[in-house]
């Protein structure tokens, strides 16, 4: 796929939905408290934020600040214990009322992509086959789209290579292509550059920046202050709260 081709143009997609005020994500008083034995551990304490289409939002903070918890809540992988959250027009949570798991599955399948610090590639599959894995549940092969995505992330020459034949940066590019295969409106990125050298980190982040400029909304968690400066919006998390300068 040529570099000028937009991968995330949802304007012609019937399934692309935003809330009435144009926000893709809207959270108010979002909280998550975990119970361990008799102890209650607050991981997120009543945060407010929103994400618009094509916006690159950076969650900045040290380990334990609440970054992964925020990503898991937005991605429907965990359920909040307080507050309200809407994602792509779906009310994920409103107080004690939560969306059904079937609705969350549809939300993830149709609107969200995920990429992590660990690549989570299947070792016996080629790069092309790994990118196609999410389409198993869509009952389609998507070979052409998977190949186009691998070309887009600079791996057109690595289609048949297995993970053990790829570098760390190449494996992260495969993971990114896999996250984009269902043409999501929002990419949730949990420290995807944490295990990469500086040059590869910058290449991956630059690619994400390009995708955001093309219309993909990104929620990117990091402890890297230098990367945070390259986002559109920075949410500084500390002990489960958003810290305002």
Image (cartoon, rainbow, N blue to C red):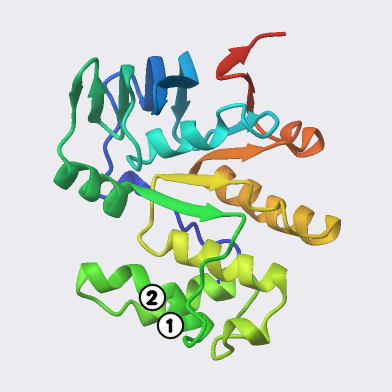
Q: Nearer the viewer, residue 134 or 141?
A: 134
Specify whether 226 is left or right of 211: right
According to the picture, the residue beneath numbered tag 2 turns out to be 132
At horizontal 55% and vertical 74% (from top left) the residue drawn is 150
| Spot occupied by residue 225 in the image (x, y as percentages of width and height) | 79, 32
Describe the element under mark 2 as helix, strand or loop.
Answer: helix
| Spot occupied by residue 178 in the image (x, y as percentages of width and height) | 46, 66
Tag shown at residue 129:
1
Q: Residue furthest right?
A: 198
At horizontal 72% and vertical 8% (from top left) the residue drawn is 245
In space, the residues marked 1 and 2 are separated at their CA atoms by 5 Å
Quick check: marks 1 and 2 in contact, CB under 8 Å?
A: yes
At horizontal 66% and vertical 87% (from top left) the residue drawn is 165
| Spot occupied by residue 75 in the image (x, y as percentages of width and height) | 38, 41
Q: Residue furthest front?
A: 38
Crowd rating for badge 2 (residues with CA inside 10 Å; few <14, some 14–19, many 20+): many
| Spot occupied by residue 94 in the image (x, y as percentages of width and height) | 23, 18
Specify whether 14 is left or right of 222: left
At horizontal 47% and vertical 86% (from top left) the residue drawn is 125
């Amino acid at each position: 796929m040529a570099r000028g081709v937009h991968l995330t143009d949802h304007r012609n997609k019937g399934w692309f939905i935003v809330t009435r005020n144009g926000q893709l994500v809207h959270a108010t008083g979002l909280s998550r408290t975990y119970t361990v034995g008799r102890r209650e551990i607050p991981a997120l304490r009543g945060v407010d934020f929103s994400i618009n289409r094509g916006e690159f939002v950076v969650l900045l903070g040290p380990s334990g600040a609440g970054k992964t918890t925020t990503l898991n809540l937005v991605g429907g992988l965990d359920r909040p214990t307080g507050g309200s959250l809407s994602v792509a027009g779906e009310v994920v949570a409103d107080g004690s009322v939560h969306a059904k798991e079937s609705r969350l599955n549809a939300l993830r399948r149709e609107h969200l992509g995920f990429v992590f610090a660990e690549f989570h590639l299947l070792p016996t599959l080629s790069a092309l086959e790994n990118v196609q894995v999410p389409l198993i549940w869509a009952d389609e092969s998507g070979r052409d789209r998977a190949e186009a995505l691998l070309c887009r992330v600079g791996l057109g020459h690595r289609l048949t290579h297995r993970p053990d034949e790829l570098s760390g940066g190449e494996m992260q590019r495969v993971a990114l292509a896999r996250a984009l295969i269902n043409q999501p409106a929002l990419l949730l990125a949990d420290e995807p550059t944490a295990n990469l050298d500086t040059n590869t980190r910058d290449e991956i982040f630059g690619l994400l920046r390009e995708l955001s400029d093309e219309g993909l909304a990104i929620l990117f968690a990091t402890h890297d202050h230098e990367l945070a400066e390259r986002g559109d919006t920075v949410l500084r998390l500390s002990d489960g709260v958003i810290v305002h300068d």
